[in-house]
Amino acid sequence: MPLNYKNKEWDGPFGLKRNIFQIPKDKLYPIFGAGETLGVITAEASAQTGLVKGLKVIASGSDKACETLGVGCIDESTGSISLGSQATIETTSDRYYEVQRFIPPFPAVDPALFNPEINVYRGFWMISWFKNEFAQMEKTQADLEGITPEELLNRRLNEIPPGCSGLMLQPFWGNEITRPESRGSIIGFREDHTRLHIYRAIIEGIAFALYEGMTKIEKKSGVRMESLGISGGGAQSDVICQIFADIFNRKIYRVQTFETSGLGASIAAFRGLGAYPNYRDAVNGMVHKNSEFLPVPAVAEIYLELYEKVYSKIYGGLKSVYISMEKILERER
């Protein structure tokens, strides 16, 4: 979009993005801040939806902005980890800065703030990929027990040691914006590795990628994230939350729902209705931590060594291979 993310308004007539996209001015809709009233439910809309005529329609924020607010991340001392189809790590800042050049921070729900973000584009979609390609046995058993295949797989995660007995995964199953030639990779296979090793390696690989993102945000902000709220479908698993606590070597916490995007949108609505004087008070009143996961020092030490000596070197070591592979595939097309 031809949006000036810093000023939270459309680009002017000489703005670079405005001239690239060439969208007529009359097609650029009015911009409202989260918490502002957009209008009310009309009689026609009431008849079609059952919603009460005259009910206020209040603006909310983007999905990740609401998720970050809903997990209680209101300043740079806290991070927000989202384990959805796209896995992200964000923080909330009163300063505009680009963690990756030319990739702006998103506007936060609070109109005075921003959400710097690093994104793993396939994220926990990779769990669905694994389930469809390798977990037919669990899918069948889960149907018989009336549970999800992920629940069965997560029960067995602790059968595999931290580091997956030397198996390491880089989760670039989707194209990375700043590393467009990158591809996913799994290295370190031995004869004793199983499907469960691959499953745990996926989770660890996503966590390593998000940990790398955290270090980039901290380097840019100059502020250490002391704790991290975690949400999204993957956050329902205690074992997965503990893996993230050990890899990040920080306290990980959950709030009363893993659907924090909905909670954040509700906070915007209550703020818009005047139930709270500001977003900080709204978070204090509506977000409730209900579980914490603390890193195990010995395990965190293993993961740090794996990150520094293995994971962080994979992309640089394979970049030329990725480029050659792409050139060969382009000729085949």
Image: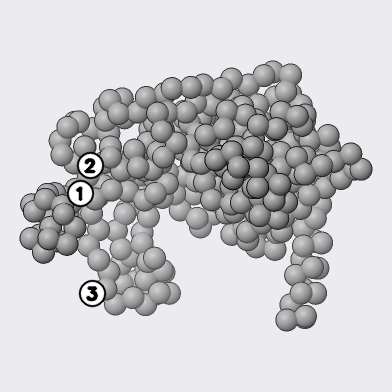
Amino acid at dot 3: Asp
Amino acid at dot 1: Ile
Between discs 2 and 1, the one toward the N terminus: 1
Please tell me how crowded label 1 is: few (under 14), some (14-19), or many (20+) other residues with Cα within 10 Å.
many
Q: Which quarter of the picture shows residue 320?
A: bottom right
* Disc 3 element: helix
Which quarter shows the C terminus? Answer: bottom right
* Disc 1 element: strand
* Disc 2 element: helix
Residue 291 lies left or right of residue 244; in this view the side is: left
Q: Are marks 2 and 3 in contact (CB under 8 Å)?
A: no
User: Residue 154 at x, y = what percent?
Assistant: 64, 35
Above or below, 206 against 134 in this view is above
Between discs 1 and 3, the one toward the N terminus: 3
Between discs 2 and 3, the one toward the N terminus: 3
Residue 37, visible in the rendered structure = yes
Q: Which quarter of the picture shows residue 262?
A: top left
Please tell me how crowded label 3 is: few (under 14), some (14-19), or many (20+) other residues with Cα within 10 Å.
few
Q: Which mark is residue 26?
A: 3
The residue pinned by badge 2 equals 269
Q: Residue at x 11, y 64 (%)?
A: 44
Q: Which mark is residue 58?
A: 1
User: How has the structure been colored for display?
Assistant: one colour
Give the CA separation, mark 1 to mark 3.
23 Å
Q: Residue at x 34, y 38 (%)?
A: 263
User: Residue 65 at x, y = what percent?
Assistant: 39, 45
Q: Residue at x 59, y 59 (%)?
A: 177
